[in-house]
Amino acid sequence: MRILSIETSCDETAVSIVEATGTFPHANYKVLGNSLFSQIDIHREYGGVFPAVAKREHVKTLVPMLMRALKDAAMLLPHEEDSATPRTEELYTLLTREEGLADALIHFLLQYEKPDVDLIAVTHGPGLEPTLWVGINFAKALSYAWGIPVVPINHMEGHILASIFDGHTIPDLVFPAVSLLISGGHTELILIREWGEYARIGETRDDAVGEAFDKTARMLGLPYPGGPEISNLARDARKNQVESFVQLPRPMLESGDYDFSFSGLKTAVRYAVQDKTLSHNDKIGIAREFEEAVTAVLLRKTKNALMEYNAQTLIVGGGVSANTYIRETFKEFFWKEYPMVTVYLPPRNMSTDNSIMIALVGHAKKDMALSYDRLSEIKADGNLELGV
Ligand code: KG4
Ligand code: ZN
């Protein structure tokens, strides 16, 4: 089957077409088309993601991304002469809140044939609700125009699959597995007993890891997104053996549970840097200390969870799993201390938001797809949870 997937939960507008042969998880996947537009350059000017700005960009970019994905897949086929005009009234109703999108979509539908796609998968949470709605309404409009069912997808489940997908297949996992999900909005430890059976065993009580990276970066005068910036400075500090002038806490390291808290860490950085003119070495030293504090807590809690639940599979996912120091530390630690644990880390292009991961979950959940008459049941849920 062919799946068209749409991701708009934050600041990446992404559309893919993935062909799945076989049944989940033992299928073969072929990514036929994949397009992604990152809004980072736009948000950098504002120092962060404003939902209204992000929404406007998704509205502008969705049709071009759809066309690019279809073109990659050799599925962007101009109409034969006598094609029917789409019933536009319903499309305008579905997209009333996405100004300009109905016009762009109708223009596209007038030019191109319905592609050979069986299912539309769209992220419906968690994320920014105004931007989630853009993707959802677009999926509904395509569903209406083409008569294809839609399956709503949890973005975090996408990150789990992104971390284990090798480009063609999903490996046979030894369950139970533990997943550490670290992104701009989330920091969670999830116990996976079986495919689709999730239990959240720990989460952040305040800031997400990515958020802490971004806020700390801002205090050091670095641009958004701060994760990669901090990571570069920290690497310099390690290379040049520069230590931090201040020791930061390792919050909740010994709390005995699987919860996290990163806002204290950010506050400690604020106290350390306020009223101080920072030298280059001060900055890179603090970046290093911050990265090491975060990594120590993530590693300890993850290790404890694997031990308690007798799990031999670890899946690290989410945007922050692009961080080199976190990746290297996790790999080395488990390789040396717990060689029976298999550690899955996403390739870098699959660690940040993308739509391939949404297509993979779409395949797993294809039986939950809704046909056009039931699409009103699909709603954006900014706080959608994975496991309770
Ligand atoms: O998963 P993601 O792309 O979007 C969300 O769903 O939130 O994650 C984005 C987050 C941002 O906070 C960004 O600073 C962080 O991931 N990030 C990193 C790195 N690359 C991205 N954090 C630390 N080190 C990195 N190399
Ligand atoms: Zn994400």
Image (cartoon, rainbow, N blue to C red):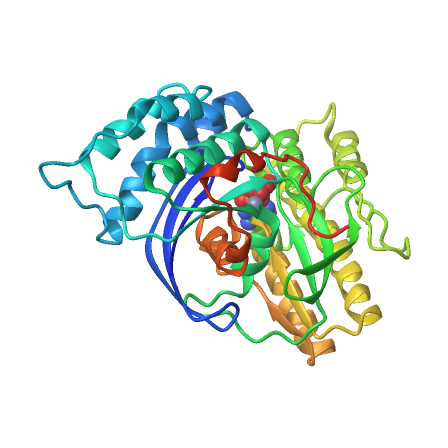
Q: Determine the residue positioned at 39% across, 33% down.
A: 141
Ligand 2 located in image quadrant:
top right
Q: Which residue is drawn at 35% across and 20% down?
A: 100
Q: Which residue is found at the position 53% from the left and 43% from the top?
A: 123
Q: Eyeballing the image, is 353 above or below 139? A: below
Q: Quadrant of residue 152?
A: top right
Residue 33, visible in the rendered structure: yes
Total number of numbered discs in the rendering: 0
- For this orientation, the residue located farthest to the front is 373
Identify which residue, 287 or 201, lies in the foreground. 201
Tell me the quarter of the picture where residue 342 sits: bottom right
Across and down, in percent, residue 264 comes to 81, 37
Camera-side residue: 336 or 312?
Answer: 312
Figure check: 382 above or below 190: above
- Residue 231 seen in render: no
| Residue 133 vertical placement versus 93 (above, below) | below
Give the residue at the far left of this rendering.
Answer: 81
Identity of the residue drawn at 37% across and 53% down: 118
Whether residue 258 is situated above or below residue 66 in the rendered picture: below
**Image x and y of residue 383, in percent:** 68, 37
Residue 384 position in % (x across, y down): 67, 41
Task: Give 282 or 374, whichever is nearer the viewer.
Answer: 374
Within the image, what quadrant is residue 178 found in?
Answer: bottom right
Q: Where is residue 93 in the image (x, y as percent from the top left)?
A: 42, 21
